Image (tube, helix red, strand yellow):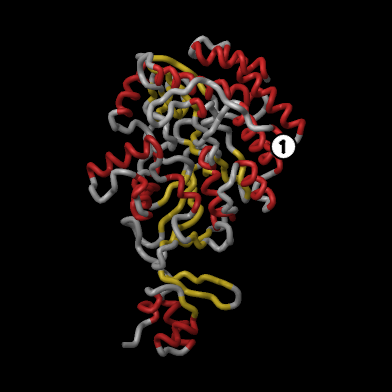
Amino acid sequence: MTLSPAEFLEQGPATSKEIQVATGLSQAAVSRQLQRLKHCVITIRYGRTPQYVMTRNAFGGNDRLPLAMVDACGDAVLVAHIRPLVTGGFYVEPSAEMSSLLLGDRGDGLFDDLPYFLQDMGPQGFIGRQIAKELHARFPEFPSDPKWWTTDHIGRFLISNGDDLPGNFKIGEQALLRVRRNPVPVEDAEYPRMAEKAMHGEVPGSSAGGEQPKFTAFSAKSTSHVIVKFSPPGDTEISRRWRDILITEHHAAMALRSQGIPAAVTRLLEGRERLFLESQRFDRSGQHGRMSMISLASIDAEFVGSGSNWPRVMKALAERELVSPKQVHDAEFLWCFGKLIHNTDMHLGNLSLAMDSNAFRLLPAYDMCSMGFAPRSGGEVLPYGFTPQNPERLVIDDETYGAVRRAAIDFWDSLTQDSMISKELYVFGKRWSLQM
């Protein structure tokens, strides 16, 4: 049976010549048919011979999903359209004002899966699992664990929850048309109650990533959007250790800022036998404004593909003029500093960049803490102690290492002066500070 051009293109991308052979139509007839189908056919230009591919409806929407970036004032600016393809991939249909970074590594706007800049926005970590469980209870077609979610699950979630997602992207008509509501300020005294709700599966706030127990809120004290981590209650060995780790994150941020390295602004507070670490979000501005934020993991997967460490990926991006030498220096500083405070959790998801015109810009450090001291998965709490990596293996210059070392000394000195740390950490910190 003879196929029409539309029926043939539903099988996958094809050139005009391939369409002619499959349909028996002349070149002129195929051109006329493609012109009639231009609302649902994308032209892909590889060399001299263009290919044509059909779009499809996706995520409960149509085949042309608006993509907007929310600015610092809270206004959504349309930057492109996402075109789902019958092949299962996606095409970013550009606009005149959009960053070339949205077109990806090849610069053609074609992606085999969700574009890299949307990959971080699905549920993940502690809060992500709570979201998935809640959605599963209401809509059983959503798996109860986000690791089992398909691209369709993630896309439907993004379209329905545009206001609460990390970063500043919104996708779909539904997300763009939603009425903007003022955030409800939360007092410090409410943090213990919010922690209890989070531990019982309720989801206060947005889908910030990370495995440590946390919630998000709009702080009445700082009048800013915040992420709040919290320790287990009580005075057990495990709760004391998690308290210590939260305190190390607070002092690490202060030590970095003292050396001119941007880091999240943090605050410690106690309530109902828990310690809370509040971090001001740098993907939010004021009540409604939002800022770009994409993990180095997603950027590496699209533009580098090394799966390596922070300095190596940043250097590879710099070679392509996608980040500045200053950004590479700061990433190297953070990496080396983390080694000197026993941060064993410096994976590519724990460093983020922002789109800044047609290049990326390193965002302030977050989750920088002495995670190597954390209780083991079986609950064992090991004595304090670690051997830092040899500075020669960190591949940084002597001047930078000197500044990093000063920041680490400041960290250990200020940490041991904090009355909230455990006796065990105080003794270790004093000894370690003298060794440095």
Quadrant that contains the C terminus: top right
Up the image or down, 418 lies above or below 257; here it is: above
Residue at the image point whose x is 76% and y is 31% from the top: 399
Residue situated in front as seen by the camera: 43 or 348:
348
* Residue 1 placement, left or right of 210: left
Q: Crowdedness of circle 1 by 10 Å Cα count: few (<14), some, many (20+)? A: some
Q: Residue 34: x percent and y percent?
A: 44, 78
Secondary structure category for the residue under label 1: loop
Question: Which amino acid, by three-letter code, is at mark 1?
Answer: Ile
Quadrant that contains the N terminus: bottom left
Residue situated in front as seen by the camera: 191 or 304:
304
Q: Residue 101: x percent and y percent?
A: 58, 53
Residue at the image point whose x is 47% and y is 69% from the top: 42
Residue under numbered circle 1: 396
Residue at the image point whose x is 35% and y is 15% from the top: 234
Up the image or down, 301 lies above or below 24; here it is: above
* Residue 335 placement, left or right of 83: right
Please indicate, yes or no, whether residue 183 appears anywhere in the rendered image. no
Q: Residue 185: x percent and y percent?
A: 39, 24
Please indicate, yes or no, whether residue 357 appears anywhere in the rendered image. yes
Up the image or down, 298 lies above or below 22; here it is: above
